[in-house]
Each structure stands twice: as C-alpha cells, then as structure tokens.
Amino acid sequence: MSSVKTVLVGAGKWGTNIARTLKELELEGLVELSYVVDIDTSRALELSKKYGFKAVSSSIYDASGEAFIIATPISTLYQNALEAMKMSSCVFIEKPAAETYEEASYLLTLANARGIVHQVGYLSRFDSTIVELKQQISDKHVYALRFRRLSRRPPHMRSYPVTLDLMSHDIDLAFYILNTREVKPLFSLFDVDEGVPQRAIAEAIYGGIDVVFEADGVLPVKVREIDALTDRGIIRADLISKVLTVVSETGKTQIEASDREPLKEELRVFIERCRGKDVEAPDLRDAAAVLKIIDELTRIANKM
C-alpha cells in the first residue's frame, strides 16, 4: 500500500513534535512528507530542512495532500479545519478541535456529510498508562475517578481557559475509561485571572460514577494523575512516571506501563484510518461532547 501524502499545518513547538514523529513513520513507509504550512515561513522552512518536507507555504490554500494534520493555536483550529476539509478526505485536528460546542458540531456535520475521516488529538488515550489502567479496572467495580492535571502554563497559553487547555483531556479520558456517554455536570469552581480561568475544579456523574477533575495552570511542578476507586481498593495511575500503584486490603503493588510513545501511536492510527482501516480513535463526536460539558461547567461556575 502506498504512503499517504501528508500536510502539516503548524510549525510551532507541538507541530515540531508531530513533524519528528511523521518522519519516523515516513521511514516505515507509511507517510510521505508533502507540505508544512505556517504563517511564519521561516519556521516552516526550518522544519522542512530538518525533516524533509517537499514544500512549504505560509497559507493552507497553497498546500495539497491526502491527509491534513492541524496543529495550530486553539483560536485557529476551527478555521484551519474548515479549509482542510475542503481539500482532503482525511483530517486530524489537535484538541480541543474548536473553541465552542457549536463549532465542533458544525465540523462534525460537515465531515459526516462529505465522508471525511476525522480524528482529534486527545493524546492521553494512546498513553500506555491509560491502556494499563483500563485493563486493571476491567474486572472491578469502579465507583469514582479523580483526575489531576497540574502544571504551570506558558504565557501564550494563559489566554485560554484552563478547562479548554488542560481539563479537556481528562473529560475525554473519563468517556474513554468508563465507556459511557451519559454525563451530568454537577459542580465547578474557577479561579479567574484577567478574565480567564487559570485553575478549575469540577465534578460530574458519568453513567452513575462520580468523577472529579482538577486542572491547575499555575503550579510550578507537573502532575498527571488518575485515581480509580474500586470495590477492591484504589489504583493510582501516574502518566509521568508511567507507574500504576494498586492498593488493596492485602497490600500495595506497582505496575510499570510500557514506554511506547503516545504521539507515534496516535499518528500511526490516524494514517491507518486514512488508508481505510477501521481503528478506534477520538474524533469530532468526542470533541463536541467534551466542549458541551465545558460549556455547562462554565455556566455553573459563573453562577457561583
């Protein structure tokens, strides 16, 4: 099967990570690095020289390829996704895919109408720690989940609500881990600075299971943890160390997850889906569901 001609839109920090990973997939014969697009042409040129993209452009309108990967700032994801859907039948959009539920829903409607393969960059689903956590709880009764996603955000990200930037990952992970679409937001409290939530805590019921989210863009250390409370004890998954700690009445054990790179797995799945393979992955339906919950949590917090 021929390699997929791939366009990368966005040559910033995360776009650079994606370019590195695409190069690895190119060496496996899965992709062909077609275009890299960035409004800063010098960044596009630098990335092209480093990883071997065949062409560069400052505008998405000049690019061509079979698959488009959108890795631009949150405020421009929606517009770039719209344009990519006019030019390709296979589009990957970094999370949260849009800024509002309405935007994500429109992208979903458009993708379905045009038969476009679409995927959204909820990277944590591909983390081996999450895979192991799902396996560990598969034979247990989970009655609560606790998410903590804490780390100081760089200045350019502080203009976005921490719910959209950080908490969105865990709202999606709760869908994925618990395999339910039934969600009822209960509570949210935001710590706002210059009109933007920088810290947030929220609670929701996912199919009868109590889920609490904590997102903090201020803390000077990085924390990525999930606690699963079950009928047999507690399982703590640390996404940074890739270690699961299982505590029960009989004692404590630790399980090391594999060191498989989530980004490579995520993009491999995307390319496989572009080639027609039926593989599970987060898409615009998931993005719209996450944004709908964020909208509701924002409404609740504004009433506090």
Image (spheres, helix red, strand yellow):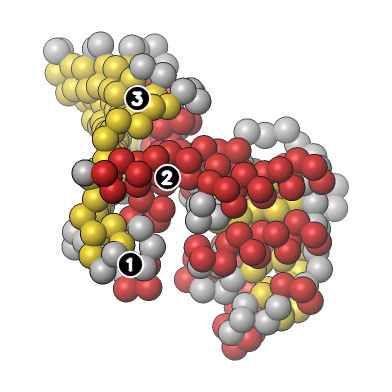
Residue under the point 64% across and 64% down? 79
Compared across the picture, whether 252 is left or right of 230 comes to: left
Mark 3 or mark 1: name the one nearer the start of the chain. Answer: 1
Q: Work out which quarter of the rendered image holds the C terminus and state it.
A: top left
For image coordinates 51% across by 66% down, the residue present is: 75
Q: Which residue is mark 3?
A: 205
Residue at image mark 2: 295
- Residue under the point 53% across and 46% down: 101
Question: Which numbered disc flags the more N-terminal residue, 1 or 2?
Answer: 1
Q: Nearer the viewer, mark 1 or mark 2?
A: 2
The location of residue 253, given as percent across then percent down, is 22, 25
Crowd class of label 2 (few under 14; some 14 to 19; many from 20; radius 10 Å): some
Name the image quarter holding residue 9: bottom right
Q: Nearer the viewer, residue 161 or 179?
A: 161
Residue shown at 46%/30% (left/top)? 175
Q: Position of residue 210 (x, y in %)?
A: 29, 24
Numbered disc 3: secondary structure: strand
Label 2: element kind: helix
Name the image quarter holding residue 29: bottom right
Q: In the image, 140: left or right of 51? A: left
Where residue 194 sits: x, y (%)?
26, 69
Question: Pointer 1: what residue?
Answer: 158
- Dot label at residue 80: none
Amino acid carrying label 3: it is Ile
The residue type indicated by label 1 comes to Arg
Q: Earlier in the sequence, mark 3 or mark 2?
A: 3
> Does the CB distance between marks 3 and 1 fall below 8 Å?
no
Could one spot residue 39 in this view of the protein?
yes
CA gap, disc 3 to disc 2? Answer: 16 Å
Rendered position, 230 above or below 154: above
Q: Which mark's residue is nearer the viewer, 3 or 2?
A: 2
The amino acid sitting under disc 2 is Asp
